[in-house]
Amino acid sequence: MDEPRLIAAAATGDREAFSELVRLHQARLRALAALSIADRDDVLDIVQESFVDAWRGLPGFAQEREFGPWLRAICRNRVLKHLRARIPRRRRELALVDEALLEAPPADDERPEDRLAALRRCLDGLDAGHRRLLERRYHDGRAVADLAGELGKTPNAVSMILLRIKAALQRCVETAGTA
Amino acid sequence: MSDDLDRRIEAYLDGSLGAEDAVELARLVRAGGRSEISRKVAFAGLLVQSLDPTDGQAIARSVLARIDAEDSASGMVRAVQRGIAPRRRRRRTARPLRFAWLTAVAALLALGLLWWLGPSASGDGRIASIASGSARIGTADTAAGPGSALRLGDVVRFTGPATVRWKDGSEIAMDGGGITMQPPGPGRGLRLDAGALEAVIAAQPTDAPFAIATATARIEVVGTRFRLEASGVGTRCDLHDGSVRLTCVADGRSLVLRPGQSAVVADGISLVHGERAWRPLFPSGALAQWRQQHGAWSATADGIRGSSPDGGKARILSLAGYADLELACRLRITGADFAEIQVGDYNWFFEIPARRGAWTEVHLRQRGGELVCSADGVQLAAQPGAGVAARRGPLAFYIMPGGTLEIADARILTPDDP
């Protein structure tokens, strides 16, 4: 079913149609939220809340509008609300930087989902050990000191390895973008 | 420079950023470095998502589940509202009884659903996560480690030091022992089955406080720090900061504890220590009990003031040495980004950020292996200093070159105090 029909169906309460819309747009919303939020669970919550907002707003959605930009605007609002709400709960040091970054949000990345897809491809090309290190640090949330102990290296050495891996990934993504 | 920037951004993202680095990073953002820093923050977020295997199907399921849960709760509330009859005289007694039964059942179901939704379950049912350490979950004894989800009803046994973190930043630390992820009230919380936990709880709604139950007690928390231990003889609570209400399950009596108080719940509830007497850190004439190591220090109406006439650093060091201590004071820092409170003669220190001429409430405690400090209620990271590693040592205050430090209402509590 094409998207306008999915939207029309979902607006009448068709959950299967809405589920398909979620599958079509979730990658883009995840990438959009991830531009400002590094916490995996917070991003997934914001994406979930954005889709729930969209479900509630669909009956009033004007069919001639573009669904994607409308959905992304909902997500951007959720992201800003989350960033503002967390400042009072943060340590002062972190709140200082939060406020500075919030004063002017980052320039809108036209297609962050393309960068996310490119990053996944670049990760697939990584050495298995390096990929495992990244997963343990950024997916499992292991502290650098813990990883250093397990690897028999100093925390500084592990930090440098992670920085070099990330720099290589960044170059890979930029190269993919200009290819 | 770029390595320093990357290091600072990494620390910002994992929450370990120190005061000096935070000031520098915020300055860089405002001075035109925002786009580069935002780009690095964005890359970090995309990297986390790229490592996450959650697919679109799972997200779609979680969205529909959430919609169903919200609709069910709303429906129950509407049913309860419809079931509540307007006040009028009734001649037949059977109908009011049936009406009351319907209302009670619908209300219980609505409350149950709202309570279930209360702890803000994520799409995968997670209400908290293991932040560090390892554990075993459930009768299947499933191994769990950092990042593992904890769901409603999970029985968790810790095999060593571990921390559990909720999305709002509330955290408990345990060393062995066990908990059940079953909040005893409408807000977040758990049941402490065995062992001791240290808790740092974020501010909670007053109608949904963070709550912990043991076999003999229930504790409700609205933003505070305490130690709670459950054993065969009862439950002991030591309150460090904030306010908690401790209730004895057996007789329903409760106590509101103030910082510094401890209570035990066994057959009843009783205070272990009463309110202790703080003593001033700088009583009149007390500069004689301090060594002015750098700069010039003078007494003020309610404390002391330090600065350096030649623009260098200023430091004052107590002649007395302390191991366990509790310190409360107000600081005002001008002309510098931060001041330091140093314990154990620079064994450890805390950077207290300046607040553009405003006063900052500081609370520091060293007790056993624990060393914590907060500024205006926000916990600060302890920094290792260049001193000899020993817990007992002088207390010191330090201000950076060019700065002025005022200390007011400073009081101290040590184990020798009654």
Image: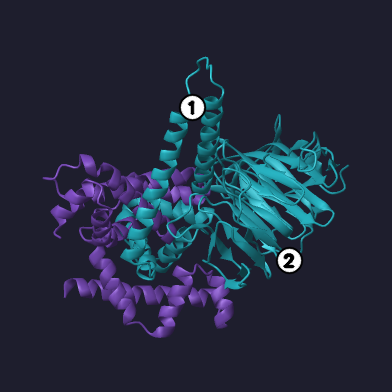
According to the colouring, which chain is purple?
A
Could you say whether the residue bearing mark 1 is in a helix, strand or loop?
A: loop
Tag 2: residue type? Val
Q: Report the number of discs.
A: 2
Q: Can the viewer see residue B143?
A: yes
Q: Nearer the viewer, residue B96 or B68?
A: B96
Q: Quadrant of residue B141?
A: bottom right
In the rendered image of this protein, does residue A12 appear above or below residue A139?
above
Residues packed near mark 1 inside 10 Å, few (<14), some (14 to 19) or many (20 plus): few
Q: What's the residue at 70%, 48% (across, down)?
A: B226
Residue at which label 2 appears = B388
Q: Quadrant of residue B6?
A: bottom left
Q: Does residue B369 appear left or right of residue B273 in this picture?
A: left
Q: Check the residue under mark 2 and report the chain it is in.
A: B
In the rendered image of this protein, does residue B39 appear above or below residue B361?
below
Residue at which label 1 appears = B84
According to the colouring, which chain is cyan?
B
Quadrant placement of the C terminus of chain B: top right
Q: Nearer the viewer, residue A110 or A20?
A: A20
